[in-house]
Image: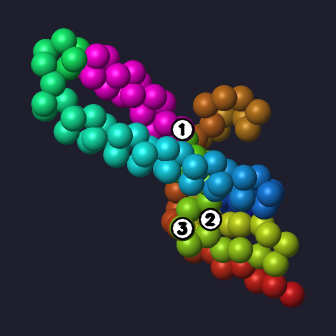
Amino acid sequence: IFPNTRIFFTTGVWDDPSLVEEQQQQYTEILKQMETMADNTRDLRRESEDKNVFQNLFSFRKLVQDSKEYDDLYAKKERYEKEMPPIGASLSSNGVKIAPTGSLVIKGNSVPDWLPGSEYLILGTFSTTALDP
């Protein structure tokens, strides 16, 4: 590292507690819907064992439709898992959450900061803890 090199840090911060709570509720609702759909699919498959071929065609169509809905719910679940604070995030007294880890980086090329394509090299990682005054 050259003298006068600026060292930057990166970490996740969630500064809107009400939004985080809303996302958590929506995430929980999605998990419940996915569990209900899985239970319904198991029941439908069990029931279809005793049906004839034509009745099974209706069941198959229902399974395909449910599969599409399940895929949509799964995509939403994945999105919420990426957006929400991870387990172990530090919580401050004002409700702000900070990711449990972060990175220290330095600029790795001479491209000006305002141009796309800036390269940053990771020097190391750190862990965070909320400090209340």
Which of the two residues, 107 or 102, is positioned nearer the viewer here? 102
Asked if residue 102 is positioned above or below residue 73 in the image, the reply reads below
Q: Earlier in the sequence, mark 2 or mark 3?
A: 3
Q: Which residue is mark 1?
A: 76
Q: Which mark is residue 99?
A: 2
- Position of the N terminus by quadrant: bottom right
* Drawn side of residue 89 relative to residue 96, left or right: left
Q: Position of residue 60 (x, y in %)?
A: 26, 20
Which of the two residues, 5 or 10, is positioned nearer the viewer here? 10
The magenta region covers: 58-77
Asked if residue 106 is positioned above or below residue 60 in the image, the reply reads below
Disc 2 secondary structure class: strand
Mark 3 is on which residue type? Answer: Ile
Q: Residue at x 31, y 37 (%)?
A: 41
Q: Say which of marks 3 and 1 sits in front.
A: 1
Determine if residue 10 is in view.
no
Q: Main secondary structure of the magenta part?
A: helix
Q: Position of residue 115 (x, y in %)?
A: 71, 29
Asked if residue 89 is positioned above or below residue 106 in the image, the reply reads below
Determine if residue 34 is in view.
yes
Mark 1 is on which residue type? Answer: Lys
Q: Position of residue 26 (x, y in %)?
A: 63, 48
* Drawn side of residue 96 relative to residue 5, left or right: right
Residues at marks 3 and 1, CA–CA distance in whole angstroms: 19 Å
Mark 2 is on which residue type? Answer: Ala
Residue 76 magenta-drawn? yes
* Drawn side of residue 8 relative to residue 119, left or right: right
